[in-house]
Amino acid sequence: MMLSSVTSTAVSSAAASTSAISMSVGIGLGVGGALIAILLIMLLSSKELLGASRMPSDKVMKSLNYMIIPLFFVFCLNVAFQVVSVL
């Protein structure tokens, strides 16, 4: 009898904590938003500094563009998600 009581208490506690976590955690787009913004700022500033240097490399500029463009789209989606979640 004692074992079934402990088991049912543990199961109900686990179910309550799972539902609390699922209610407080969003879809997942906003979780890494700060990291995306920081990485995008670092890449954009690196591109600006490289462009202002005496010998800018076209290969490096293209590779930075290949990293910046997808991050920019993810950043825009993240901002749109945050705006929609506030409304």
Image (cartoon, rainbow, N blue to C red):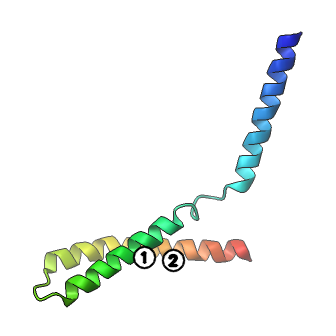
Secondary structure under badge 1? helix
Looking at the image, the residue that sits furthest to the right is 1
Asked which quadrant contains residue 52, the reply is bottom left
Quarter occupied by the C terminus = bottom right
Q: Which residue is mark 1?
A: 72
Quarter occupied by the N terminus = top right
Mark 2: give few (<14), some (14-19) or many (20+) Cα within 10 Å. Answer: few
Tell me which amino acid carries mark 1: Phe
- Left or right side of 9 for 57: left
Residue in view at x 53 percent, y 73 percent: 77
Which is nearer the eye, 38 or 62? 38
Secondary structure under badge 2? helix
Q: Which residue is mark 2?
A: 76
The image shows residue 57 at horizontal and vertical percentages of 13, 80
Residue in view at x 87 percent, y 12 percent: 2
Q: Label 2 vs label 1: CA separation?
A: 6 Å
Q: Are marks 2 and 1 in contact (CB under 8 Å)?
A: yes
**Please, is residue 55 above or below residue 86 in the view?**
below
Tell me which amino acid carries mark 2: Cys
The image shows residue 4 at horizontal and vertical percentages of 84, 15
Mark 1: give few (<14), some (14-19) or many (20+) Cα within 10 Å. Answer: some
